[in-house]
Image (spheres, rainbow, N blue to C red):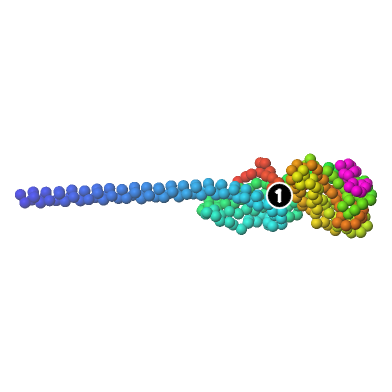
Amino acid sequence: MSGARSGTRVGHGRRRGTLYVAVLSTALIVTVIGLAALLGARLLQRATSLTENAVRADIQAQTTIDRALLRLVNDATWRARYINDTWTAPETLDGVTTSFKLVDELDGNLANDPNQPVRLHGRAAVGDALRIYSVQLTPRVRRNLLVNADMEFGVSNWSGSDCLLEPVTDDVHGGSRALYVRNRSSSSSGPRQELTATLQNGVPYNFEVWAKMDSVSRTVQLVIETTGSESGTQWFVSGGTVVAPAWTRVTATITPWWEGTLESAAVYVITSSNTTAFRIDDASLTNANPRHALVVVPGTWRREILP
């Protein structure tokens, strides 16, 4: 009878041990599931973060190109300022680090030819994500507003303001003809060309001409004249360049303006003093607005392979 009671106690202990093992196993499974869920959440969070960083880096790399292009078109000295195939100093803002570089793919020299295209690279890093894009830029071909600018058609489209213009072929800068300016009645006498139909109000223009004095050195000045209905006649005169009896390039950037309706506009080549005869050849007047200096070459935009 005592043996029966002992057997009952042994069976009860075994049931308690089995229950403990079951509870422990369940707790372990719950812990493993919890850790797995936590790890999965962390991995998902990291993957989401990486995706977000990659998207931000992708967008910012392209935006960097836009910002760099804006800098270039507002900096006439950019070819000398930047070093070929060299990243600019990194700039960091709101967790995004950006920089850009310029590459002359023809000869590796940015400064030796202003007419060569360049490839602009934009780079952006956000966390572990890095993206680089590039696009090719080319100088815009600026239209010369002067007609018969190379004097190959003699005095066509040119007139003498208180002077005589004579086409010559014996001493020219380029081509086969130049204009000889003589019989000047004053220092402000010189060749003239009308531009009423093409000149724009308040726009800077690059004015250039090659000149050669007849005997002694004189200062040659370039002029844009405007007559507005509400501002009258105005002369916008360059500082001038000393020109010897040798072909010399004379350049100036002039911004003409007027009030009301433009009634007339013209360009002149004069001297600051004296009435010495001179020659001119190969003239040009182009829009100097820097925003028109560079254009994107269609079909050259690409995402670069990361190093």
Residue lying furthest left in this view? 1
Q: Which residue does the numbered mark 1 point to in the structure image?
A: 290
Image coordinates of residue 32 in percent, x first then y, are 33, 49
**In the figure, 215 relative to 296: above or below?**
below
The answer to whether residue 184 of the structure is visible from this angle is yes
Look at 90% across and 46% down and name the residue there: 160
Determine whether, in the image, residue 32 is placed left or right of residue 195. Answer: left
Question: Observer-nearest residue: 160 or 125?
Answer: 160
Image coordinates of residue 45 in percent, x first then y, are 44, 48
The answer to whether residue 174 of the structure is visible from this angle is no
Q: How many marks?
A: 1
User: Could you tell me the amino acid type at mark 1?
Assistant: Pro
Question: Observer-nearest residue: 61 or 284?
Answer: 284
**For the residue labelled by badge 1, is the local secondary structure a helix, a strand or a loop?**
helix
Question: Observer-nearest residue: 111 or 272?
Answer: 272
Look at 66% across and 41% down and name the residue there: 299
Q: Kindly report the secondary structure that dominates the magenta region of the rendered protein.
A: loop
**In the figure, 144 relative to 220: above or below?**
above
Look at 38% across and 49% down and name the residue there: 38
162 in the magenta segment: yes
Question: Observer-nearest residue: 195 or 235?
Answer: 235
Image coordinates of residue 52 in percent, x first then y, are 50, 47
175 in the magenta segment: no
* Residue range corresponding to the magenta coloring: 151-166
